[in-house]
Amino acid sequence: MKNVAKILCVFLLGLASATTATAAQLYRWVDAKGNVEWRDTPPPTAVPSKNIEQRRIGANVIGTGDVPFSVQLAAKNHPVTFWGSSDCGKTCENARAHLARRGVPYTDKNPKSDLEEFKKVSPAAEVPVLQVGTTTLKGYLETEWDSSLDAAGYPRTAAGTRPNPPAAAAPVAAKPAENTASPSPSKN
């Protein structure tokens, strides 16, 4: 029963240290009766110093960065590869901007640097080409790309951003009405 309590104490201590940003100290020693003690405070002075172990416990937190789990999962199951070149011009710029707007992590490949693989993907050697998992899209058509990215589980907007609401129309200042009637003759 004592061992279960000690294990629980160690677990709770580890859990408490995992929730804090700083590391904690953990002390282990064997008391006079042969029991192993684990505490976050140093042992009493009566314990011989040769039996004392001091351990530093760091936070037990897995950092995932800024990428949401849903995006990580989509990228794992349906990795995205973009094939484009400098010859592609505005079309490739728009395609890359589209992927960035949606927050899609992708591999950017230049057909000239990996020609053999590119010929397998696009025998006609047309750019841009988007691969979403096993789906290959030739050319850039926003609705088609959105459909494939949606089906793969990628978000509509980048993490932490929201689409901009439509701009409110600026109020137009009313002009004073001009008198279009011809002047009336004056009476003298």
Image: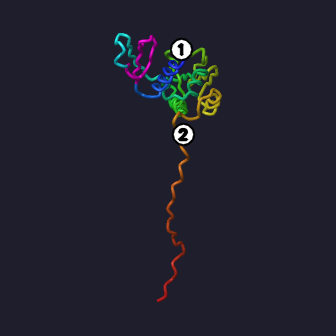
Residue toward you, 27 or 181: 27
In the rendered view, tell whether residue 142 sits above or below residue 35: below
Is residue 91 visible to us here? no
Residue toward you, 72 or 54: 54
Q: Residue at x 50, y 17 (%)?
A: 112
Residue type at the position of mark 2: Arg
Mark 2 or 1, nearer chain start: 1
Name the element at disc 1: helix
Q: Residue at x 45, y 13 (%)?
A: 36
Is residue 29 visible to us here? yes
Instruction: State the image coordinates of residue 138 (x, y, percent, origin top left).
Output: 61, 24
Instruction: State the image coordinates of residue 120 (x, y, percent, origin top left).
Output: 60, 14
* In this rendering, position of residue 170 left or right of residue 145: left
- Boundaries of the magenta span: 23-43
Q: Residue at x 35, y 10 (%)?
A: 50
Instruction: State the image coordinates of residue 41 (x, y, percent, origin top left).
Output: 39, 23
Image mark for residue 115: 1
In the rendered view, tell whether residue 34 sits above or below residue 73: above
What distance separates the C-alpha of mark 2 from that of mark 1? 38 Å
Image mark for residue 174: none
Read off the residue under disc 2: 162
